[in-house]
Image: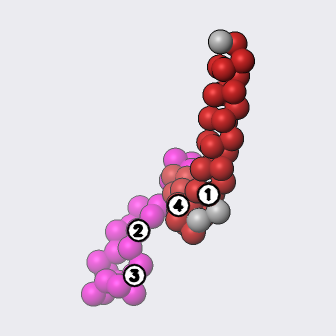
Amino acid sequence: MKYRDGIFATIALALTSVALAGVVYTDAYSQAASAEANGVRALTEAAAGDTIACADTAMLSSAADTVQR
């Protein structure tokens, strides 16, 4: 019984490691990790009050439409 549990645990660990490696080496994982890092950086800057995320003024109809802090 003890040996059977050890064998199953070893097999489960090996399969989990292979599955995790497969996910890490896909483009979807790298894109999600990059997006998360950018989001955390933006939230950190907004919480610190250093910068405020706003629309690009070139996209607005006029510069007078921008919001001033």
Mark 2 or 1: the one toward you: 1
Mark 3 touching mark 4, by CB under 8 A? Answer: no
**Mark 2 and mark 4 in contact (Cβ < 8 Å)?**
no
Q: Earlier in the sequence, mark 2 or mark 1?
A: 1
Q: Amino acid at mark 4?
A: Ala
Q: CA distance from mark 3 to mark 4?
A: 28 Å
Label 1 neighbour load within 10 Å: few <14, some 14-19, many 20+: few
Q: Position of residue 47 (x, y in %)?
A: 52, 47
Query: Residue lying furthest top in this view?
Result: 1
- Earlier in the chain: of badge 3 and badge 4, it is 4
- The residue identified by callout 3 is 57
Callout 3: SS? helix
Residue type at mark 1? Gly
Tell me the magenta residue range. 44-69
Distance between the Cα atoms at labels 4 and 2? 23 Å
Residue under label 2: 54
Residue at the disc numbered 4: 32
Please name which of the two marks, 3 or 1, marks the residue nearer to the observer: 1
Decide: is 68 above or below 46.
Answer: below
Q: Nearer the viewer, mark 4 or mark 2?
A: 4
Residue behind mark 1: 22
Look at the numbered discs 3 and 1 and tell me whether their residues touch, using CB distance below 8 Å: no
Of badges 4 and 1, the one in the foreground is 1
Q: How is the image coloured?
A: secondary structure
Locate residue 52 relative to residue 37 in the image: left or right: left
Position of residue 19 measured from the top left corner of the image (x, y, whole percent): 60, 50
How crowded pointer 3 is (Cα within 10 Å; few <14, some 14-19, many 20+) is rated as: few
Near-viewer residue (43 or 50): 43
Q: Could you say which quadrant of the image residue 33 lies in?
A: bottom right
- Asked whether the residues under the numbered discs 2 and 1 touch, taking CB atoms below 8 Å apart as contact, a structural biologist would say no
For marks 4 and 1, give the CA distance.
15 Å
